[in-house]
Amino acid sequence: MISQTELAEQFNRSRSHLRGVAFRMLGSAHEAEDAVQEVWLRASRVDASAVGNVTGWLTTIVGRVCLDMLRSRRRRREELTELADLDRVVAHDDATGPEDEAALADAVGLALLVVLDTLGPAERIAFVLHDLFAVPFNEIAEIVERSPAAAKKLASRARHRVHGVAAAPAADLARQREVVEAFLAAARAGDLSALLAVLAPDIVRRADRVALRGGVETEVRGARRVAEETVTNAGRARFARPVLVNGALGIAVAPRGRLQLVLEVAIHGGRIAAIDVIGDPTRLRQLQLAVVDTPPRDGSNSPTGIHTARPASLDEPSLR
C-alpha cells in the first residue's frame, strides 16, 4: 500500500519525467508545467494504494490531461500569426538556464515539435506515448478512449506523417541538407561571405505579405541582396531547422516549436537558387511537413536528424 506521503515523494521523483512527456505532447514548457500540476491535483484526490507502477500511472494521467489541453487549444486555435510576435521572442529569448523553453525545444528536436503540432490531439498522444516512451497500446487506448487496435492505428498514422516520404533519393537529400545546413549556419552567424558562397548568383527570394515586415519587397533578386536581407534577420535563424515540405527539403522557422514561417528552397548545382517564404496561416496549414530522417553526410549530430523509434529523454527515465 502507498500512503499520501509516499505518493508525494514518488510524484516529486517523477516530476522531470512527467514534464518531459508533457512538453513533447504540448510543445510548451509553461503548459507542460501546468499539466504536471494538474496531474498532482488529480492523483492526490484518489486512492493510489493499489497502484503498482506509480510512474506509469502518473504518465497515464498526464496523457489524459494533455489530451484535454490539446483539444481545448485546437478549439481556441491560438497560433502566432504576426512577425512582431516572432521578433519579441528573438529579443527576449536570451534566457535563463536548462529549463528555458528554447533549450527544451532544442533537446527534443525543434523540427519534431513542428511536425507534432500538425497532428490531431489523439494522434499526437498515441505517437508520443508509444514511439517516444514505449507505453503499451492497451494503456494508450484508455487515455484516448479507443480500442487498442484503434490506438495502434493512430500511432501508425502519426508515424507516417512525422517521417513523411522524401521526393528525392537519400543520397540527393543528404547533399541538399548539407547546403541547407550551411545556409542556416551562415545565417545564424550573420556571415555574409559564407551566405554568398551557398547562394546562386541569380537567386530569387519570394515571400507572401504575412511573411514580410512592412516595406519589404515581396521579391528580391541576386545573391548579395538576399544575403544582406538574411543577415538582417539573423536572429530568426536560431529558430530555423531543415524539414521536409511536401516531400522536398525546406526550412521551418519555429520559435519554441510553434511554426511561424516555412521556406521552400530550390537547390541547383550545390547552391540555393530560389527561396519561397510562406507565412500565411492558411498556406502553412496546407503544407505537409515531416522531419528529415537522413543525417548529414558528414555524420554530424544535428538536432534535426530525428529518429523516434526509441524512448526519448531529457533527464527523465523511460517507463519500460
Image (cartoon, rainbow, N blue to C red):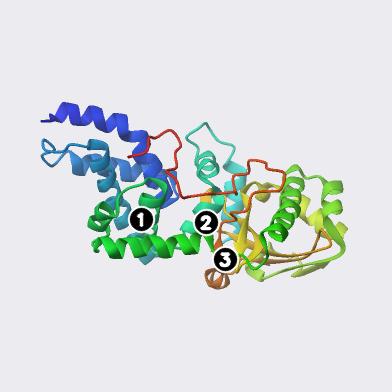
Q: Which marked residue is nearer to the observer: mark 1 or mark 3?
A: 3
Q: Position of residue 170 (x, y in %)?
A: 66, 59
Neighbor class of circle 2 (other Cα within 10 Å; few <14, some 14-19, many 20+) is many
Question: Quick check: 290 above or below 45?
Answer: below
- Residue at 87% x, 47% y is 193
- Residues packed near mark 3 inside 10 Å, few (<14), some (14 to 19) or many (20 plus): some
Q: CA distance from mark 1 to mark 2?
A: 15 Å
Circle 2 residue: 114
Using the rendered image of the protein, determine whether residue 111 is visible from the camera's viewpoint. Answer: yes
Of labels 1 and 3, earlier in sequence is: 1
Mark on residue 165? 3
Q: Quadrant of the N terminus?
A: top left
* Mark 1 and mark 2 residues within 8 Å of each other at the beta carbon: no
Q: Which mark is residue 125?
A: 1
Horizontal and vertical percent for residue 300?
A: 67, 41
Toward which corner of the image does residue 264 lie, by quadrant? Answer: bottom right
Give 217 or 240, whichever is nearer the viewer: 240
Residue drawn at x 32%, y 52% is 66
| Quadrant containing the C terminus in the rendered view | top left
The residue that appears at 36% across and 46% down in the rendered structure is 134
Q: Position of residue 252 (x, y in %)?
A: 61, 57
Label 1: how many Cα within 10 Å (few below 14, some 14–19, many 20+): many
Q: Gap in Å between the C-alphas at discs 2 and 3?
A: 17 Å
Residue 110: x, y in percent? 55, 49
